[in-house]
Image (cartoon, coloured by chain):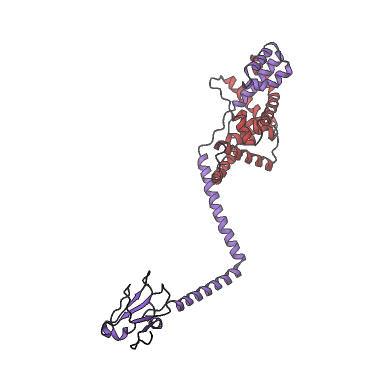
Amino acid sequence: MINVAYQMTGDAELAQDIAQETFYRAYRSAATYKQIAKFSTWLYTIAINLCRNELRRRKHKFYSLEEMAERDEESSVRIDIKDESAQPDRDVEQKELGKLIMMAIDTLPEKFKQPIVLRDVQGLSYEETGKILKLPEGTVKSRINRARQRVKEILEPYIDKTFLEEN
Amino acid sequence: MLKCDNVHELLWAYCEGSLDSETGARVKQHLSTCALCAREHRAAMATLEGLGNLSPVEAPDDFLGKVWQRIDEREASRGLLGLGLVWSWVRLNRNVLVAGSLAFFIALIGVRYGLQNDAPPQMEVAGEKEAGAARTMAESDYRDDYILRDIPETTPVLSGFDAGGQDTIETRFITRDVVPSVPYSNDYIQSVVQPVPDDDSAF
């Protein structure tokens, strides 16, 4: 939950607050939970709605790369890329890539950000993503592909420099 | 042979491996011959890899404790909110409450007083003072020493007998179903039970 909230808001403290609120809401509404969907789907739905409300309340702004870097330094949460065999240079590259991806996600409009976070970051299925967002699977796929395309466009200069030259 | 536009449309599905084997093979063949599309494919794969490899944000150690703390605080504040609402209502409707309370107590006293008057008094068996003997009440046989009149079927009635002397007068109730738990007054008994006249004129 913290992860989703963090990807959605880009704010570590806010993400923790939203995650706590998600569990509180779930506790309060446990009696109304119906076993139509998975429990995790229900929790994600609560978390996404809270993120949506919070972002609208705060009128979420878009960050520049510098602001993003500063915010990440201040944040207690580290954005690391999994690479257990990594060499130091590769680690740095992966960290940079992670920051870029976060920034790219952050620039997406909400309706594209939600499905790509749930599907590509959290690893949920298209079906589950559609249930959480209350969207048809086709719409979810379409939005995810457009979001991926946008992220790819932002990453391409960096990818060109690092990954593509290696191959 | 697929064109570049077709491959671009199928690229994300190809990267995820969700294309059927035939279409997948055709995309693969195109990528092996088109450098531009192959580059797109590598960029797409790197994007998906990057998205998937964003390391999960770990919850702090005290996260669960904070969740429970929030639950406790919110529940407590909800309780206080309820009390606060009640108190506010009381303050706003003080006069109504005072008037209502007075009316309630007056009604309560009235009901209690009325019940006391309606309650059957303690039974005093005829001749008790004179005899000074203990009387018993129980289901009993009925004797024709007295005429029962105007007595509902389920009403306990007095059956007495004179076994030869005043001291032996015993008063019993006939009840078909219920032994009365509340004795009836002597006046009441006298009103429903009449001694058989000696001359049988009543018959």
State left or right for residue A37 relative to residue B11: left
- In this orientation, does residue A10 appear? no
Which is more toward the observer, B70 or A113? A113
Q: Residue B169, located in which quarter of the rendered image? A: bottom left
Q: Is residue B157 above or below residue B165?
A: above
Identify which residue is drawn at 53% across, 43% down: B67
Which percent across, then down, holds residue A132? 62, 36
Which percent across, then down, holds residue B189? 38, 81
Q: Residue B21, located in which quarter of the rendered image? A: top right
Which percent across, then down, holds residue A119? 62, 29
* Quadrant location, the C terminus of chain A: top right
Task: List the single residue furthest toward the bottom.
Answer: B199
Q: Residue B174, located in which quarter of the rendered image? A: bottom left
Which percent across, then down, holds residue B42? 66, 18
Which is more toward the observer, B35 or A98? B35
Q: Is residue B140 above or below residue B61?
A: below
Identify which residue is drawn at 61% across, 66% down: B93
- In this orientation, does residue B14 appear? yes
* Quadrant location, the N terminus of chain A: top right
Q: Which chain is represented by purple in the image?
A: B
Identify which residue is drawn at 40% across, 81% down: B192
Look at the image and give the colour of chain A.
Answer: red
Q: How many numbered discs sit on the rendered protein?
A: 0
State left or right for residue A49 relative to residue B138: right
Task: List the single residue furthest toward the top.
Answer: B33
Which is more toward the observer, B194 or B97? B194
